[in-house]
Image (cartoon, coloured by chain):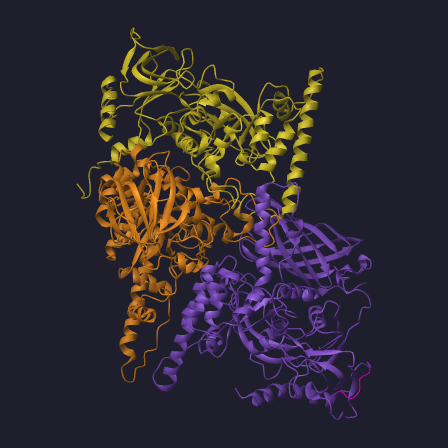
Chain colours: A orange, B purple, C yellow
Amino acid sequence: MKKHIYLIAAFLGLGVGISQAQVQKGSVLIKNATVLTVTKGNLESSDVLVQNGIIIQLGKNLTAPAGVNTIDASGKYLMPGIIDAHSHVGLDVVNEASAPITSEIRMKDVVNPTDMGIYRALAGGVTVSHAMHGSANVVGGQNATLKHRWGSMDPADIIMQDAPRTIKFALGENPTRVHGRGNGIQPRSRMGVEAVIRNGFNEAIQYKKAWETYQLAKNQKGNTTPPPAYSERLQTLADILDGKIIIHCHSYRADEIYMLINVIKDFNIKKVVFQHTNEGFKVAPEIAEYTMGASVFADWWAYKMEVYYSTAFNAAILQKNGALTSINSDSAELIRHLYHEAAKTQRYGGLTDEEALAMITINPAKQLGIEDKVGSIEVGKQADLVIFEGHPLSSYAVPQMTFVDGVKYFDIKKDNNDQRQWVAATEMVEPIFLRANEEAHRCMQDVDAYFEAFQGAFLKEKH
Amino acid sequence: MNKQFLKAGMLGLLVAGWLSQAAMAQSDPTGKRRVTSTYAITNATVFKAPGDPGSKATILIKDGVILGVGSSLSLPKEAKIIAGDSLYVYPGFIDGAGNMGITKPKDVERPKDFVSSNPADEIAGITPWRSASDAYAAVSTQIDDWRKAGFTLSQVVPDGGMLPGKTALVLLGDGKANNFLKLNAALAANYRSSRGMYPATLAGVMAKFRDIYQNTTLVLEHERLFTFTSGVKRPQATPTQTAMMPVVQKQLPVLFAAGSELEIRRALALQKELGFKMILTGLENYESVIGAIKSSGTPVLIKLQVPDDKSIKAQKAEGVTEATKAQYARVKESYDKALKQAAQLEKAGILFGFSTVDAKAADVQKTLKAMMDNGLSQKAAFAALTTNPAAILGVSGLVGTIEKGKLANLVLTTDTLFKEETQIKHVIADGYVFDYEIKKKAVKAETSAKPETASNAVQVEGVWEYTSETPAGSSGGEITLKRENGALGGTITYDDPTGSGKASAPIKNASLTGKTISFEFDVAAGGMSLTVTISGEINGKNMDGSLSVPQMGSFPVKATLSSPSQAN
Amino acid sequence: MNRMYKTFCALLLALLPVVAMAQIDGEFVKPRNGKFLLKNATVVTVTKGTLANTSVLLENGKISKVGTNLSSDGAEVIDCTGLFIYPGIIDGGTRLGLVEVSSVPETVDYADVGNVTPNMQALTTVNPNSEAIGVTRVSGVTTVLTVPSGGLFPGTAALINLNGYTPDQMYGGFKAVAMIFPSSGRRGRFDRRSDEDVKKDGEKALKEANDIWDNAKSYLELKKSGATLAYFPEMEQLSKVISGELPLLIEVNAASDIQQAIKWVEGKNIKVIFTGVAEGWRVADEIAKAKIPVVTGPVQELPTRSSDRYDAPYANAGLLAKAGVKVALRTDDEENVRNLPFHAAFAAAYGLGKEEALKAVTINPAEIFGVADQYGSVEAGKRANLIVSTGDPFETRSQIMHVFIDGYRIPMSNRHIRLYQEFLERSPGLKAN
């Protein structure tokens, strides 16, 4: 049976690895919760039945099938597992900062399932994170969508194998600093950023054509066309042009956002999500019309020039202009309280509970192309769920339990402090990391090291 | 494979060497040349292979080959007798992957038009065409040390970047002979990224590996087309692609260095994706990945070392909080797990040998004992030193057991192997006999505890080549030390932090106390000047220590004395 | 909420004379001094309980009366029915006003060159026009301690109110010399010093601190004895700490460092406040016993050790308070000091409790800084620093409706809000023209 599935998967070009991951699926009945479905309103004092990792029934007075645990959630809130559309948690490497285009880089290669950040995110109700390449390059690597199945030592187990491919792009200060100012190659300006992208796509078109020509010629009698060189870099760009990959583009200023919109229009690309997008509010109508929206910070600003003219009302303006909007963390710290970050859209712009919750559930799910699987509490969806004490949008809310595929990975009452998966046999004293926050923002991780350990101390920019 | 054919081929090399020697070197004014290459170890207790309970026998060897093993051999007159009555004889140990005798290749000068996003392969550490044999010196203290520990054969791995080159099998015999048993035994690979250029990270190394592999496949296809069809553009394989071809054609295994569980998983995933033959080496933490190794059928070479017990010994029984006790327990648990790993490999039925990389020859006995105290059977330990690596390296027909026709690689001990008081009296490698002094008293007295002679015995002056591991990757240069008017001084070169190439700085405050050398130098970076301190211990021609940078921390540094100054 | 906001803006416009000038479109709303009667609110005084249907009269920059049935007596009346009055929120540690854009060194003024620079005055460099000030105060944070950093004695911190056109107008009546206590912690992931090196470096740094301290003591003693000493501004400022004129803010975070700092302070007979105190929960009893008040935070922060429970930083303030430590909170931030109420909410939810959390950002910092006679509660006679909100100001869904600082009515606007007003319905929209 398994082999059969494997063969079909291979035939459909889904790649290897699907059948190898031993993903645990759970069954559970959660009773008497205020169920915040996000997509279908709120259900008071209701039950959710999960079997084999899938939500199979919503309603009142449900009974647990034999062998299925019941959890009483009276007085508590149940919401879909939180989805972070921008994270670097669970990655050993963030930036391959050595070239302006590195689309051949796969974050799946460097996933680390033992990163403590994963457990800490679970304790904040986050069940899915988008583990992204950093922002050093105009076209960065291909990202990995992770499901926080804490406890496995196998990266394959925490990679969401059925999520579509996504890739990181980055505009503005970071790529121009790294490549232009750092290494003396394009891009040094935002003009250069556009040129690098257009050059890349045009080369990819030629690359694709060369391969098509070869494939046609190959089986002809007396063929004299040799195979062209292989380039996963260009092949990946070609896949973007073919609509197989969703672009997630690090961006801040309105002008650069608008530039990329023009580029994708020219290349007939539809699948683009803007990340950070601090000045997205200025081009909200364009983002709403031509893209898959924006994934933004709740209130970050002023840490560098291109975010100085930001507003905390960004998410509200985008939302009210019809842009698909999500709130993300880009931080091992913020990821712990995305429910609170989403709640800030109520302070800054007065969004409704449903709109605010959608920004950390169904909206990021749509931007990652996984909205048919997660992001709301609906029958048939994967049972990624969080139980809260207090409404999740209250500043006093405390996540109690977090489930992924119906398996409980976090329980506030059963947290036994030391959750490390791996401890060095030679550890003398556990290291203390003060002001860990400053290092929690990892968009530019590995870039300092890339330049030079000594100089690294002077390169402080982040995000 | 045809065993006889292989053996004949390999030995042909060696025999040719001897013949020429015999023809040319009749006289030896040094008086040191051995008078015979025939030896008989008489009436010893011989353990022919793992599992053999041992029996009395005589072994006759000649010209590096075992001519016979038995009780009624007729010994030729030229046989030099080694009385084996009180000795125990084992097959010579095999190092699955080591770097003894290997020198690091010189850094390639970066050209003026160097582009960090697309460097030449050679600069980026991609040199699969290189061979360890070109970087191998048959005479080195490391080789002496490992031979003394019973090792007679090593797969030496070239030093360098992600694809440093091909390995070679060398016999640890006489330094003057041609010691190569097999060239191009495997292609060495590891996750070493390049400093300041593509591929700069682990992620880049993975992508680059795929790129090289796939393009080599395509060049082969191109070559086929070119061979069979006229009018085809001439294929132009790069040196990298040419060297990768046997890997892609699955004729040559990749010797992939992977220390941690995640590194092992990553190598296994890459192997599964591309389909090359693979041997994993340098395994350090692999407890949770044993199942995956088993199902992949990959042979492994684990590090011949166990974690040091400094932290375990430092744990205090009293006066610590409950929280600290819990921390201790985690470390202890991890430590215990690490010691049990080898036994688990045995249990899982995985073919494994040892790698001497990073291990200390003087600790071999202690390391093996720790593994056996934690469940590894004697038989498995024996096999991991002999028959397993022979099988992994594809030379079972030549080495690994004591049999007629195999190479004369033997270890002669004072008692049965793995006993604490057992000592190695002779090692026979490639038919050459090496004698070792037997210490009368407790074996406990560790060699390192030997009182050193005065510090003037320590050779510091000369040119040292060093490498250091920093968060930016590995870097290195040369340290030139000399004494002037009694004061130690000199210069150091290092990777210029502000650009490419090397910068140089004078050495200040240098001192040598006992075997410990320390000095400082200034690095200018970002408009500031940092004082970097290097200190380390010198052992023979090696220096092991740390490089510390204010505000950044300490990083390991290793150096070797590449050209010692002559004492004046 | 949007409608409520618009109504409020319209209200402000109506109240103000419209200045029409040829080249200037629109009007600027300035902070306004005056006599205000905030009528019929629920007053959360912090120190005197919560009073329903109560009014507060502000005049001459002070809270003149708190009570029912207060007569307006010429005051501008603001109907606060259904609204809540809280004292202005105080952040016990920030870099507000000392930095504008952190990645642009030209705008970063909280650290100068040198290890011992206690004479560097934060108040000197506070930029009253920093965009971050306008962004912060509409959140209800009216007063902050702004602190230099870097080196052993980075400078002198100052309490400032978030209204005024000169630093002197903003000055809140409290200064303290900052000290970064020598640390045995690591500086981050790239700090690869050996355990021994970390310890050695820590000891060396502590010895250096002691030497400098002894130097300052000599300076003070000689000066007291009437000696004529060469100009030495660093020692001059440090001697003020030794003489008790200025308190010492000691930034200390790792548990062993806190213990060391307690020992270091012992017998020095100086006024001390610990700041940071990230691992305070490990040694809370010892801090309580030493009777040293603590300004801790940020609360929304990662644990210091991998093995720590995930919520250690959230729970820290609560555990300190439970042990008997006087606790105030801080963000240790610059542009996002506005999040202090949310940090307080997290501390409240993870053990501190709502009431104590409120104190930790009002009366406690006022007491710790010795300015409780002016700040920290809604009481007659105190400075008119207070906020009017639609509910609990720690809740994101509450809106802060009015902010008063030093009796000035603060315009509820800043660049973030102006950008919202401009871009919510952009014109032209999607299509050109």
Locate residue A117, reporting x and y percent: 45, 48
Q: Residue furthest front?
A: A66
From the viewer's side, name the closer residue of A329 and A243: A329
Residue at figure coordinates x 42%, y 11% from the top left: C381
Locate residue B423, reporting x and y percent: 75, 71
Q: Quadrant of residue C401?
A: top left
Residue at figure coordinates x 42%, y 71% from the top left: B274
Locate residue B361, reporting x and y percent: 69, 66
Q: Is residue C168 left or right of residue C424?
A: right
Q: Is residue A435 left or right of residue B390?
A: left
Compared to residue B185, the image places residue C421 above or below, namely above
**Magenta part mainly helix, strand or loop?**
loop
Compared to residue B426, the image places residue A392 above or below, namely above
From the viewer's side, name the closer residue of B312 and B455: B312
Compared to residue C425, the image places residue B552 above or below, namely below
Residue at figure coordinates x 80%, y 71% from the top left: B438
**Which quadrant holds the N terminus of chain A?**
bottom left
**Which quadrant holds the C terminus of chain A?**
top left
The answer to whether residue A171 is visible is no
Q: Is residue C357 left or right of residue B83?
A: left
Locate residue B266, reporting x and y percent: 46, 63
**Residue A369 among those drawn in magenta:** no
The answer to whether residue A60 is visible is yes
Instruction: Tally the marks.
Output: 0
What's the magenta region? B25-29
